[in-house]
Image (cartoon, rainbow, N blue to C red):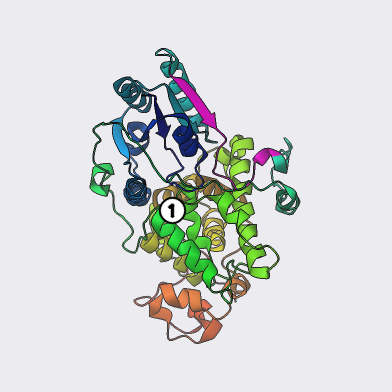
Amino acid sequence: MAVTIALFTRDLRVHDNPALLAAVHEGAAVVPLFVVDDRLVGSTRPAANKLRFLSAALAELDAELRCAGGQLVIRHGDYVEAVDRVAAQVHADSVHIAEDVTWYNRCRLRALGERLARRSCLLHTHPATLTAVDPADCGPYRPDDEVPDFATYFRRWLSAPKRRPLEKPTELIVPRIESDPVPRFDELGDAAVSPQLAVGGEITGRALWRGCTADRRQPRGRSKGDLTGEGCSRLSPYLHFGCLSAAEMAYHTDMATPDGRAFVRQLARRDFHLQFLVARADLARSGAGTDVRQAHDPVVVGAWRDGRTGYPIVDAGMRQLAAQGWMPERARVIAASFLTTTLQVDWRVGAEHFRRWLLDDAASDRFTWQQAGRFDPRAVGTAERYDPEGNYVRRWIPELASLPGSEIHRPWCHSVPPSVYPAPIAGSAST
C-alpha cells in the first residue's frame, strides 16, 4: 500500500488545505503529521499564550481528522529527525508540505528535503497558504521602500486572482502508527498565560467567522481606527496558526458591501505585512530606531508593561494585552509610539514584550514598530480620535469609570489621587 505524509505547519485545518488534499489524492494511506519542534517550543523565552493556543488548535485539528476517519499523529523533537523517522516507519513514498515565508522555515524545509532524498522519499512543496493572494501578483517592494505604500498595494491586491477554496477530504485512511498525545500547555511551557485568553482551532475559528458574517447589520471591520469596534479582527490568531484560510475568507466575502470591503481590507493589510517582513527583513530587524541599544529605566518600562503610565489610552491597550493576549492594531501603534518616542526606550524592549504576549502574526508586530513614533499618545486629540466616548479606556481602566465621556482621557484635570490612578510618568500631560 502506498503511503504518503501530510505534514502540517502553519496550516492547522482540513478546509482549503492544498498539501493535505494532494496527499489524499496521491496515496492510498495518509499520515497527517505535526512535529512539536524543540527549537521553537523549547525557547528560554516562551511565548506562553501562543503555546496555549497551539495546544487547542492541535486538539481541534485532531477532532476534524477523526471525523474523516483519521487522526493527527504527533511527534516531539528535532523537526527533520522526527519526520525522517516517521517516513522510515511507514515506508512513505512522499511527503506533502506547504511552503512558509520565514527564513527559519525555509532553511528547515531545505534540510528536510535533503534528508528525505537519502531514502528516496519525495518532498512535494505547495505554495504557502498564509496569504489571501499570491504575493507575486501584488508586485515586489522596491529596495528603497522603507515606508511601503499600502494604498498602491491594496489596488494591486484587489485586482489579483483569488484562488478558489478547496474542499476538505471526506475520508482518510491512516496506517497503524502510534502517536504522542496532543500536547497540553503545561507540556509546552510554564510561563504565565493571559487570564482571559481565548483559544481554539479550526472548529472555533470557523464558528467565529460564521458569527462575524451572520448579522449583516454588524460591521465586519473597524472604521477609522475606532478602538471599540473590533469587528472580525479577533480572527487574526486563527489566521496566524492557519486554522482559517485567508484565501477562503477573501473568496467568500462580498466586496460590494461597505462591511465586506472593510473586512477584505483587513485581509489585504495582513498580506501586506507578511510580504513586507519577507521582502525587507533588514527593516523588520531594525524596527523604528537605531541598532545601538539604548539604556532604559526598568521602573519606567515596568509601568508601561503594567498599564500604569498615567496616560489612559496607553494603559488601556497594555492592560488588554496582558489580560487577553491581544489588542487592536491602533492600540499597538499608540503603545509602541509612547514607549519609543515619549519614554525614549529601545524599541526591542517593547518588541520582546509584544512577542511574549501577542497571539497573532510576527509580521504585524514588526510593522507596528516600523510605525512607532508617528503618534504622540500624550496628546488628548490622539485619544479622542480613536476612543471618542472613552468606552475603550473605561472598559480596561475601571478606576476611571466615573469620569464622564472623553474626560476619561484627562484624569490629571480631575484631581484623581495617585492611589487610584498614577500621575503621568513622562513629562507633563498635554491639555
Q: Position of residue 211 (x, y in %)?
A: 48, 68
Residue nearer the viewer, 347 or 111: 111
Residue at horizontal 43%, vertical 53%? 358
Residue nearer the viewer, 82 or 73: 73
Q: How many numbered dots are placed on residues in this image?
A: 1
Q: Position of residue 410 (x, y in %)?
A: 52, 79
Q: Position of residue 100 (x, y in %)?
A: 52, 35
Q: Which residue is mark 1?
A: 358
Answer left or right for 339 relative to 3.
right
Residue nearer the viewer, 276 or 114: 114
For the question of whether residue 417 can be seen, the reply is: no
Which stretch did the figure color magenta?
A: 121-136
Q: Is residue 130 magenta?
A: yes
Taking 208 as reference, is 354 above or below it?
above
Q: Is residue 98 magenta?
A: no
For the question of whether residue 120 can be seen, the reply is: yes
Q: Secondary structure at mark 1?
A: loop
> Disc 1 residue type?
Leu
Q: Quadrant of the C terminus?
A: bottom right
Q: Position of residue 32 (x, y in %)?
A: 37, 36
Residue nearer the viewer, 379 or 142: 142
Question: Which of the 4 image quadrants contains residue 72?
Answer: top left
Taking 26 as reference, is 423 above or below it?
below
